Image (cartoon, rainbow, N blue to C red):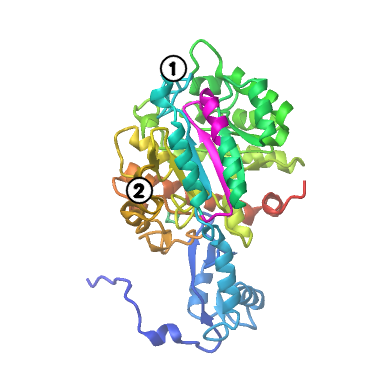
Amino acid sequence: MEVLRADRKFKDFNYYNLKQDNYFLLPFKFHRLKNNKEVIVNEVGDFIIVDPGTVEKIVKRQVSKEDDEDLYANLLANFFISEERISPLIDVLATRYRTKKHFLNYFTGLHIFVITLRCEHTCFYCQVSRATENKDMFDMSIENIDRGIEYMLRSPNPHVTMEFQGGEALLAFDRIKYAVEKAEVETSKVGKGLTLVVCTNLAVVNEEILQYCKEHKILISTSLDGPKHVHDHNRHKPRASSYEFATNGINLAREILGHDQVSALMTTTKYSLDYPIEIVEEYFNRGFSGIFLRNISPYGFALRTEKTKYETAKFLEFYKVALNKVLEFNLNGTYFTEDLAKIFLQKMITPFGVGYVDLQSPAGLINGVIVYNYDGSVYCTDESRMLAEQADFTFKLGTLENSYEELYFGDKAMEISEVWANEALTGCSECAFQQYCGADPVHNHATQGNMYGYRPTSDFCEKNMSVIEYLLELMDENPEIKEIFEGWVAPRTH
Ligand code: SF4
């Protein structure tokens, strides 16, 4: 029996050039949702959810101006089809594309200084902290701080963020003070904007430190994994409750710095998976305006034992329950966001891109973020230096002894740049969600053994695709939720 195979070869030019009575096709991709509807997405991320069979109808030029008036107008207005071979509005489309990729205009904005590796916590998922008092061995030297600041100033970005990480960054508060004061002077000399952030578990914070933060407009970013039993399970502080330190610290920091100057991040561990509602409620009840539901990095120390591993599918179940809880607050009239959804939604329903380094194409590493480690080594991202803690130096760009050019434009940067655009990766290049998603060579390398990655078994892909699908389905099924999502990404005036 003859087996019929779909012909996937490119047709000749005239096939694509054919107007066939009514319109030309502009580039777009499509995806079938779980409810069987189809979503079509154009080159700038505009999407339309259509009935099953519509994509085929569009491609076969069977959408009629008269019989399918609304659909035709929608396709035309949103750059899916054109009545001219080259749309007279092609420049508008080009401008919109540039707006979406605006984050590339200024190059590296986030400069992470791993000011110390020392820490007084012993969290099981932490890959970098060292419980030691040996300052000289694990604190960043003054020379390296100076050099890091010099490179931060070389960035063409008119506004840079200097973020202090650890270990527990506040254990090296003397170094932070030195770095802050030096960076303030140097950035003001060249007229660069400067945002300062300290990432801390708040265990050693005190009024004096916070007064200093207030004086220097330093933002506090802390970790809060959920209610006490979840947080203390995940984040271990010998002979004490990490949760008590975190929550007391949040209260004190809000009192001194102001409510909005303190943010918190959570990490979902295997233990957390059973408590989606309680975790969301913890953030809501503590007066945060949202929560960022983050899965644990699926590699490294964090998942070195079966006990701590979990599948992406489990996270997705957790995520949906938690997101539904977040939506419940909104449906009852309170603004409260989920930040992973918010990042995707901003790309889906606004003309703007998002400078979130983990979901960018070209990827955020080097383009958006760089890490100066305590020992003078320089890495592409925080995850890259975590790999180095396990003796994997694939993403080490060099050291602060190297020149700016060698670090930012050297052989390693060139090698990574070949795989950092999802537009050019197999699987992503034809994916409808390409504009919403990103490329992550570090994740690919760590989980699949090479920077290029393989989408069908990628948990990065599985997570992003499922969350985007879920957001689209929610918007399609419930206009009230669509309105809530639009509210999350609308410019806020207060
Ligand atoms: S990683 Fe997956 S969801 Fe993201 S663009 Fe690539 S194929 Fe699409």
Residue at far top of view: 239
**Quadrant observed for ligand 1 in the rendered image:** bottom left
Q: Is 157 left or right of 401, judged from the image as shown?
A: right
Q: Is residue 124 above or below residue 267?
A: above
Viewer-nearest residue: 73 or 248: 248
Amino acid under disc 2: Thr
Q: Position of residue 397 (x, y in %)?
A: 35, 46
Does 278 appear in magenta?
A: no
For disc 2, the neighbor class at 10 Å (few under 14, some 14 to 19, many from 20) is few
Residues rendered magenta in the picture: 156-179
**Would you say residue 8 is visible in this rendering?**
yes
Q: Which mark is residue 457?
A: 2
> Mark 1 = which residue?
133
Tell me the element at label 1: loop
Q: Is residue 113 above or below residue 62?
A: above
Tell me the element at label 2: helix
Task: Classify mark 2 as within 8 Å of ligand 1 or not, answering yes or no.
Answer: no
Do residues under tags 1 and 2 come within 8 Å of each other at their CB atoms? no
For disc 1, the neighbor class at 10 Å (few under 14, some 14 to 19, many from 20) is few
> Does label 1 or label 2 sit earlier along the sequence?
1
Q: Is 286 left or right of 271, judged from the image as shown?
A: right
Eye-nearest disc, 1 or 2? 1
Location of the N terminus by quadrant is bottom left
Amino acid under disc 1: Glu
Does 166 appear in magenta?
A: yes
Residue at far bottom of view: 21
Measure the alpha-carbon separation of dots 1 and 2. 43 Å
